[in-house]
Image: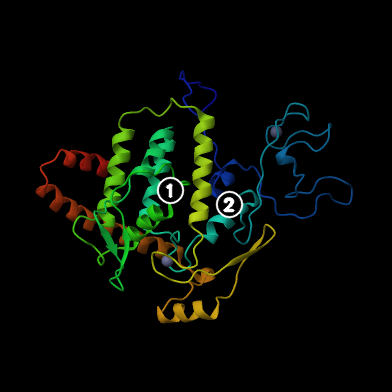
Amino acid sequence: MNIAQPVNSKVTGVSFTFYDPSEVRRMSVKQVVNPVLLDSLGNPTKGGLYDPAMGPFTKNHLCGTCSLSYFNCPGHFGHIELPTPVVNPMMFDALYRFLQGCCPYCHKFTFNRVTAARFIAKFRLLEYGLVKEANDLDDLLPKTQSTITDPETGEVIMAIDDNHGIDSDEDMGDEAKEVVERVGQDIDGGKKAGTESSDQYIDRINRFVEKKLSTVERSTYKVTMVNDARRQLIKSLISRSRNQSCQNCRGPVPKLRRDGYLKIFREPLTRKQQAVQQSKGLSYADVLHLDMAQFVKQSKEKQQQQQKQKQKQQDELSSDDSDSESSEDEDMEES
Ligand SMILES: [Zn+2]
Ligand SMILES: [Zn+2]
């Protein structure tokens, strides 16, 4: 925005974020390349940290960029090009916490996609200040009429009657939690008449969110309360992502260790975990030689394929249903 031509408008919100490298370069008046601050006469060196382009060095100097005096120059940003990527120390704690819950093979959070869908749904509701609705989502459990069976052994592992009596994710009984996790892992096997597949359940969650979001405007909510709820949610996301094996690809997840704000080490797997890793044919990606562009392209293609499949399924479903739900499906796809 050009501050010389003010726009008559009302501020509706403020958000904070970090500059990306291209923005830093555009803002910068000088690339700092010289590690020497002052020359032998005590004057600032060219390309050093005290380069006159970033502001006058003493009261007698003028600014190299705006030519104003020591008192009037606002000071200007310079930048240093780093030879290797460096993690912003402010972000390191968060990075480390999230990385501990990430799968080194499929690069997702180690919880299953149903749990992920529930977290996404809650974050979306909180984004619009819908704290109560986010809590209501805890009551939205997968439909299980009678039993869920283990897809591998065929044993009955769960038997519940209905979806009532659960207040919040923290109070959510182990039973209910397990149902959510089971349904998340249950992709083709272990399905009984009356039970919902994970896709159907995720669809139901998304429809719930769309319905709630369609009734609100974004700006009217109490910030503190929502922030508290969001903080709690992030906390529970982090604790739920601490799994010894990934619930998506079943790969064993190694422990991590950090060294200050600089390095993260991957601890070796236990012997048992190594055996699992070998039997599944999994191996770590070499991060130093990872072709990020290729990786992003691949995962995007995969996502598109999944979406196409989902659309197909939905089309089939909506042609069967004569409910009003089909219109809600369309709303959801637009977003
Ligand atoms: Zn200046
Ligand atoms: Zn995985």
The vertical placement of 118 against 257, above or below, is: above
The vertical placement of 189 against 109, above or below, is: below
Q: Quadrant of ligand 1?
A: top right
The vertical placement of 203 against 71, above or below, is: below
Residue 18, visible in the rendered structure = yes
Q: Which mark is residue 286?
A: none
Image-based side of 12 in relation to 331, left or right: right
Q: Residue at x 47, y 65 (%)?
A: 103
Circle 1 residue: 172
- Give the image location of residue 246, x and y in percent: 44, 66
Q: Earlier in the sequence, mark 2 or mark 1?
A: 2
Q: Quadrant of the C terminus?
A: top left
Disc 2 secondary structure class: helix
Q: Which mark is residue 94?
A: 2
Q: Residue at x 74, y 54 (%)?
A: 34
Q: Residue at x 49, y 34 (%)?
A: 226
- Give the image location of residue 129, x and y in percent: 43, 32
Q: Residue at x 62, y 54 (%)?
A: 92
The vertical placement of 45 against 86, above or below, is: above
Image-based side of 186 in relation to 66, left or right: left
Residue 14, visible in the rendered structure = no
Pick the front one: 84 or 260: 260
- Give the image location of residue 212, x and y in percent: 32, 34
Count of picture labels: 2
- Give the image location of residue 187, x and y in percent: 28, 63
Disc 1 secondary structure class: loop
User: Does ligand 2 reach within 8 Å of label 1's beta carbon?
Assistant: no
The amino acid type found where label 1 is placed reads Met
Residue 183 sits in quarter? bottom left
